[in-house]
Image: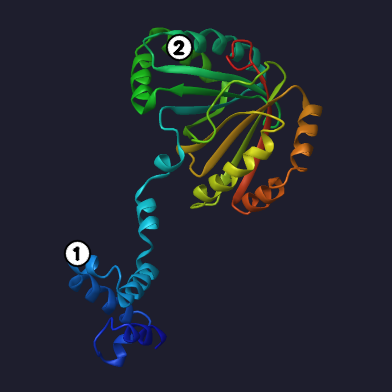
Amino acid sequence: MVVRQVFRLYGLVPHVPNNLFNASLGVSYFLKRQSSTISAEQTNREVDNPKSKASSFVRSIFHGSPAAKEEAKQTHSKLLARGKYVHELQKHRIKPEYLEDYIKLVSEHYPRIANNQENFVHLCGSWQTEIGDLDTFFHIWEYKGYSGYHDTQNRIKKDTHYQRFLKEIRPMILQRTNQICLEFAFWQTSPPNVYGGIYELRTYELKPGHLLEWESYWNRGLECRRQFCEPVGAWFSQLGALNYVHHMWQYPDLEKRKITREQAWQVDGWAETVYKTVRLVRTMETNILKPLDFSPLR
């Protein structure tokens, strides 16, 4: 009845039987009538009309505001990402007895792939876990868009050296996964100011549908953290396991990490960022990493 009275008040509907204005049929009737009777010319004439303003307000309740509808048309990749590159995050869990053999193999083949000028790829870094998921290695590759990923993969699959590499490395692996990720627009992947030390890769599985909200809070909260430590990079998954966010930091050592994180809590805004983002997270994980000798980020 409340909805009916609002519509009647602003002359939005004619007299119709009461049974049409139950919770579902009344709204359906209104939407069908509005879509069939309001023309573009009428919309233009209604700009300064009080009744039309009320009508626009009611329509926005059901349809959403024009700004919200426009945003809804865009994908997360357009709203959040830099767009120039795609990143592949590889995770390899190795049988403990093969750790040295694994390091030797990737040290030979990964730089060869990255240094081939015909490949559209750059190796950001390769790391071994020191604290966290042990006997595990992470590799981050940067491709020149999705086309660069396809072209590079098609090339290396025909490479006899790469085929030999796969044959030798498969018996060493317990599990391997990868994700295709995009960079957050506000957080461009960049090397640390000083090399050495440790890297921290933090991984968050978000509740579905909360990526935009997470990005909004972190975009502001990042300014609190970067006063004491510059981030290395941040990505969100597009292919593979979805609803994942990764961000990476570099510290001289664990003690400096502790001090840096404590300093951030003294800055206005950081506690609020943590409070708001934790509610959006399903699981979280952190790994302390040591770069391999051939890693560009080290």
260 displayed left or right of 168:
right
What is the quadrant of residue 164 in the picture?
top left
Residue depicted at x 31% and y 92%? 18
Which of marks 1 and 2 precedes in the sequence?
Answer: 1
Asked if residue 109 lies left or right of residue 155, the reply is: right
Pointer 2: residues within 10 angstroms few (<14), some, or many (20+)? many
Label ID, residue 40: 1
Where in the figure is residue 283, as x and y percent of width and height? 62, 46
The type of residue carrying mark 1 is Ala
Residue 171, located in which quarter of the rendered image? Answer: top right
Percent coordinates x, y for residue 63 in the rendering: 35, 66
In percent of width and height, residue 230 lies at 65, 28
* Residue 22 showing in the rendered view: no
Q: Which residue is mark 2?
A: 113
Please report the residue visible at 55 percent of the width from the left and 13 percent of the height from the top.
106
Q: Quadrant of the N terminus?
A: bottom left
Query: In screen coordinates, is 47 left or right of 246?
Result: left
Q: Quadrant of the C terminus?
A: top right
Q: Secondary structure at mark 1?
A: helix
What amino acid is labelled 2 in the image? Answer: Ile
Residue found 54% across the figure and 26% down from its top: 189
Vertical comparison of 161 with 2: above or below = above
Left or right of 12, for residue 184: right
